[in-house]
Amino acid sequence: MQKIEKLKENRDFRRLYYHGKSCVNPYFVLYLMKGRTKKTRIGITAGKALGGAVERNRAKRVITAAFRSLMDNISPGYDFVIVARTRILKEKSTKIAQIMEGQFKNVGIWCEKAD
């Protein structure tokens, strides 16, 4: 399993917002870009429009669980920023993982690995 590092710097988020590729669906917006290292890095944002702290933290947990389940099949060395949208509050991480997998396949960073 690859190591997940968190994006924390504002400049990293801005770099992905302005220069990264974006994929939109009703549950989240995915920004991705080839990183400068071999590590996969992820940043998750949930704005106040999503709800209170409980709702925002749940959205982040669902996204993290879905992403972690797909980590082994993602090409290494990419940076991701995932922006939660309101509909994600009603879904489980398994459905979000299926949607993420479809987006990763569309973008071309999905690689099937035998278990």
Image: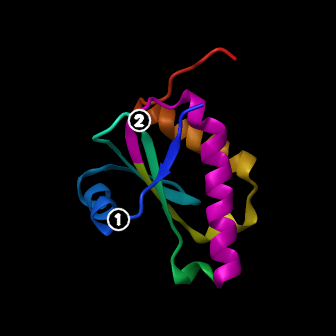
Q: Quadrant of residue 100?
A: top right
Q: Quadrant of residue 99?
A: top right
- Answer whether residue 56 is magenta in the image: yes
- Answer whether residue 70 is magenta in the image: yes
State the residue in front, 14 or 51.
Answer: 14
Residue at image location 56% in from the left, 28% down from the top: 73
Residue 13 percent coordinates (x, y): 34, 62
Residue at image location 56% in from the left, 67% down from the top: 85
Residue 34 percent coordinates (x, y): 31, 39
Residue at image location 59% in from the left, 60% down from the top: 27
The magenta span reads 52-79
Residue at image location 73% in from the left, 59% down from the top: 91
Q: Secondary structure at mark 1?
A: loop
Left or right: 101 as drawn, with respect to 109 = right
Left or right: 75 as drawn, with respect to 35 = right
State the residue in front, 37 or 86.
Answer: 37
Q: CA gap, disc 1 to disc 2?
A: 25 Å
* Residue receiving disc 1: 9
Label 2 crowd bin: few (<14), some (14–19), many (20+), radius 10 Å: few
* Scheme by which the image is coloured: rainbow
Q: Earlier in the sequence, mark 1 or mark 2?
A: 1
Residue 86 percent coordinates (x, y): 61, 71
Which amino acid type corresponds to the residue marked 1 in the rendered image? Glu
Left or right: 67 as drawn, with respect to 36 = right
Residue 28 percent coordinates (x, y): 53, 59
* Residue receiving disc 2: 107
Question: Is the N terminus in the top left, top right, bottom left or bottom right quadrant?
Answer: top right
